[in-house]
Image (tube, rainbow, N blue to C red):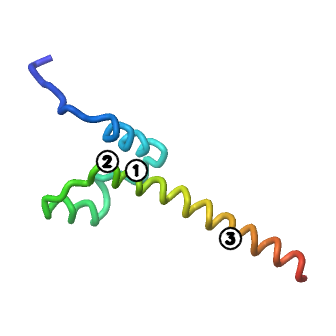
Amino acid sequence: MLGYRPPALEIGDLASHSLAYLNPFRDEDSGEFFEMVKEDGLKITWYARIWDYLSRIFIAYFVYQTIQAFRKLGKSSG
């Protein structure tokens, strides 16, 4: 194996990377924001990734619920 040893990752770090498979279009290697963060020498931590993915799930759910509420309201008022 040519003497390569992967860096030691903790459980939270591994779990936060596994959430990227749920949305492969959004990864840390794309986008101007992540480029800027890497240039500044900042590191995106595992709990920041988990917070990001969980917030996306909740926001999508709340948008869905808002659309459904307006559809129901539109049918009852018309």
Picture quadrant of residue 77 = bottom right
Above-or-below relation of 25 to 2 = below
Residue at image position (27%, 65%) is 32
The image shows residue 2, relative to residue 60, as above or below, that is: above
Q: In percent of the image, x 66 and y 64: which residue is there?
A: 64
Quadrant the N terminus occupies: top left
The residue that disc 2 covers is: 46
In contact (CB < 8 Å): disc 2 and disc 1: yes
Label 3: which residue?
66
Label 3's element? helix
Q: Nearer the viewer, mark 3 or mark 2?
A: 2
- In x, y percent, where is residue 70? 75, 75
Label 2 to label 1, Cα distance in Å? 6 Å
Which quadrant of the structure image shows residue 74? bottom right
State the SS at label 1: helix
Q: Quadrant of residue 33?
A: bottom left
Q: CA separation, marks 3 and 2?
A: 30 Å
In the drawing, what numbered circle is on residue 77?
none
**Image point 90% across, 82% down: which residue?**
78
Amino acid found under the numbered disc labelled 2: Trp
- Name the residue beneath numbered marker 1: 50
